[in-house]
Image: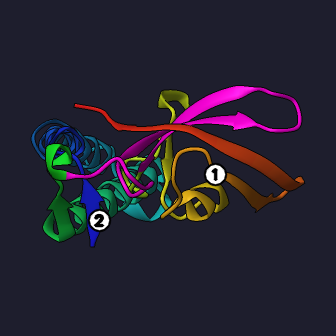
Amino acid sequence: MAYMTQKGYDKLVAELQQLEAVERPKASAAIAEARDKGDLSENAEYDAAKEAQGLLEMKINQLKATIADAKIIDTSKLSTDTVQILSRVELMNVKNKAKMAYTIVSETEANLREGKISVKTPIAQGLLGRKVGEVVDITVPQGKIQLQILGISFED
């Protein structure tokens, strides 16, 4: 089950519609064009078009499965007492005093550029269930870090 916001769900549905309505016909047209060029046994363009179509269909099926398993969470009904999925957590690295903020989301919504980390990352796992003011020791690939929770909120 993938927990996500309505915004994240809508983004996945829009991506699926784009793939089915625009990309799928393009892939079919590329195959037809390559097929018209003659002998299929030695036609690299045809093979590449078929492979691209297969990858596209796989992505479409993955999106459909994710959408089918999606559970949309209304963040207005969640508590900011502890860190949980969809929480926006303001943190400070105790060692170097660097401040950062992450939103804990499902794997399908994770995007580090947007400050969204997967619930399955070591940082998210270490923060779940913790409260404001707590200092948490988290093991990351570079070693151990200590993060202090400065605030918990939810994005609209």
Residue 107 place in picture, x, y as percent? 43, 58
Hey, what amino acid is under mark 1?
Glu
Q: Is residue 126 above or below residue 4?
A: below
| Closer to us: 101 or 33 | 101
For numbered disc 1, what is the local secondary structure? loop
> Going 48% across and 60% down the picture, which residue do you hit?
119
Residues drawn in magenta: 78-104
Q: Which one is closest to the eye, mark 1 or mark 2?
A: 1
Query: Is 90 left, or right, of 99 in this rendering?
Result: left
Count how many numbered circles sit on residues in the image.
2
Residue 81 drawn in magenta: yes
> Going 17% across and 37% down the picture, which residue do you hit?
18
Residue 15 drawn in magenta: no
| Closer to us: 36 or 139 | 139
**Residue at mark 2:** 2
| Closer to us: 47 or 70 | 70
> Going 22% across and 46% down the picture, which residue do you hit?
5
- Along the polypeptide, which appears first: circle 1 or circle 2? 2
User: Pointer 2: residues within 10 angstroms few (<14), some, or many (20+)?
Assistant: some
Residue 124 place in picture, x, y as percent? 56, 56
Quadrant of image for the N terminus: bottom left
The label shown at residue 134 is 1
Residue 75 place in picture, x, y as percent? 20, 46
